[in-house]
Amino acid sequence: MAYNVLIVDDSATMRALIRKVLVISGFDIGEYFEGANGLEALEILEQNWVDIILSDLHMPEMDGAGLVQELKKHEMWRNIPVVLITTEARPEVIKPFMNLGVQDYIQKPFRPELIRQKLSGLLGEARTTDASEIESCDF
Amino acid sequence: MLAKLKAATFEVLETMFYLFPESLEGGETLRSRGPFLRSSVTIAGPQAIRIGLQVPQSLACKMAANFLGATEAEISQTEMEDILKETTNMIAGSFLSKLEASAAFKLQTPLIQVLGAKDKNKKEPEKSLRFEVDEEVMELFVEKG
């Protein structure tokens, strides 16, 4: 199954790298979108269906925390898994983001297989959750 | 501190660039041709420090090509500069993790400078490490921030 991926990073070079790593990892990408900050990501989400978001922490205009806060306000977007791509993985830095609802993080430097493993795990979990929610609905 | 910084540098170069640096001892020299790119990132906090990386532009170009899966001829100046900034950022982030530094230490935005051969040796950094990477010299330095 192919997944639509949104990458949010202020460096075009990093976005290109993450895209390349996703391809190398064998992750099945459907549509690929990219934004340079949280505001651009929200504009993309207004127009497109996205299955997973990979986001940097520090960006101008709207950073990773701002983006996650906005996502959580919207019914349509609040369950989209968000993975932080970060140079900093100290618990003191990551924990506030996890408290905001970020699902996971990947610390740079990373290997392609790690990305695939994390994304497949998250999307698998998301699908399972969705399925169980549907099953438990009283139509 | 320098041992942790060296470990962080090797980890980043090996994982992201498939480059395997070797430490250069005090007297060892390698010919390096300019211009050079110098990237630095400040770690703000109770004792602010600046970590920097200086490489010949030719090495930055190789790194960018490896990083992006492109040929060296396809690499732009912006890409070289972005890659070096990102590399310095990754080294600093990995270094902070290895130090288990508190949240009071924060990474600032990396900066980049293009240096000519004359500028390169103007100011000796307080602490530095030199590596041979793909037959070129990479210098890593630490200064008070």
Image (tube, rainbow, N blue to C red):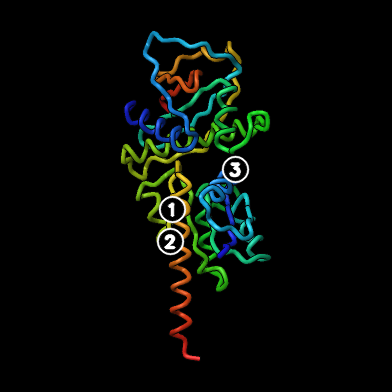
Residue found 55% across the figure and 30% down from its top:
B63
Give the amino acid at mark 1.
Tyr
Q: Secondary structure at mark 1?
A: strand
Q: Which residue is mark 2?
A: A121
Nearer the N terminus, badge 1 or badge 2? 1
Mark 3 in CB contact with mark 2 (< 8 angstroms): no
Choose between B99 and B18: the one closer to the eye. Answer: B18
Q: Chain for mark 1?
A: A
The answer to whether residue B143 of the structure is visible from this angle is no
Q: Indicate which disc residue A105 carries.
A: 1
Measuring from the top left, give residue A84's x and y in whole percent. Answer: 48, 53
Q: Which residue is mark 3?
A: A11
Q: Nearer the viewer, mark 1 or mark 2?
A: 2
Q: CA distance from mark 3 to mark 2?
A: 26 Å
Task: Assess disc 1: are there few (<14), some (14-19) or many (≥20) residues with their C-alpha within 10 Å of its C-alpha.
Answer: many
Q: Secondary structure at mark 2?
A: helix
Q: CA distance from mark 1 to mark 2?
A: 12 Å
Choose between A124 and B92: the one closer to the eye. Answer: A124
Task: Assess disc 2: are there few (<14), some (14-19) or many (≥20) residues with their C-alpha within 10 Å of its C-alpha.
Answer: few
| Quarter of the rendering containing residue A117 | bottom left
Measuring from the top left, give residue B57's x and y in whole percent. Answer: 59, 22
Residue found 54% across the figure and 31% down from its top:
B84
Q: Nearer the viewer, mark 3 or mark 2?
A: 2
- Rendered view: B26 above or below B15: above
